[in-house]
Image: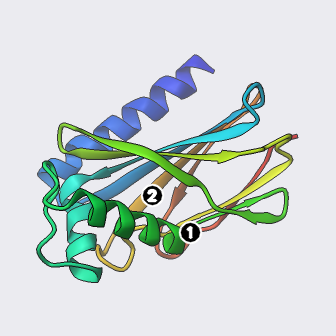
Amino acid sequence: MMNRTFAFSFFVWLLFVQATIHPYYVSTLEIDYRPDRAALQITMRVFTDDWQLMLNTHYDKTLRLDPDSDEEQMEIHSTEYLQQHLELKLNGKDVTPSVLGREYQDDQLVLYLEVAGVAELQTLGVSNRILFAELEGQQNIVRIKTPTKRKNYLQTQGQARDLFRGL
């Protein structure tokens, strides 16, 4: 299990390093089921310049990130975009994560989301289509973790839907 975790971590690191050298576009979405908190805790990492491109293309050409030129508009547009391009289906029912916050780490925007009131996780359908319309070749890594199981998916423009079975 440790070798798989190391290999996945190395793969993600390699993709991020390569993205600064070559035109690779990648984001990560980590979903951690926390039964002790009855929640899905979600962390999304995306390159700041890619997210700014999306904001400028779809919403406001004057918005700038890190530091934010208009924090309120950035939050409104980011939340709207996530609601349109990130679909979660928990135990067969659509759920919408709440945006809890965000921060900048080096050249990445880290978004923190949560789905509360999750009594159990039998299945979780994930469709992460962020930045597919803006960046040709965009790839989104989805990592799902429960106390007993871990699974990784690579979502691309041709394959952006996966089903995790928790039991």
Q: Distance between the residues labelled 2 and 1?
A: 8 Å
Q: Mark 1 points at which residue?
A: 160
Label 1, secondary structure: give it: loop
CB within 8 Å, label 2 to label 1:
yes
**Drawn side of residue 59 relative to residue 38, left or right:** left
Coloration mode: rainbow
Q: Quadrant of the C terminus?
A: top right
- Determine which of the numbered discs, if any, sits on residue 140 in the image: 2
**Drawn side of residue 35 relative to residue 167, left or right:** left
Crowding around mark 1 (Cα neighbors within 10 Å: few <14, some 14 to 19, many 20+) is: some
| Residue 5 x, y percent position in the rendering | 53, 26
- The correct choice, above or below, for 70 with respect to 165 in the image is below
| Residue 32 x, y percent position in the rendering | 63, 36
- The correct choice, above or below, for 164 with respect to 86 in the image is above
Name the residue at 21% across, 64% down: 52
Name the residue at 63% across, 67% down: 161
Which circle's residue, 2 or 1, is located before the other in the chain? 2
Location of residue 12 by image quarter: top left
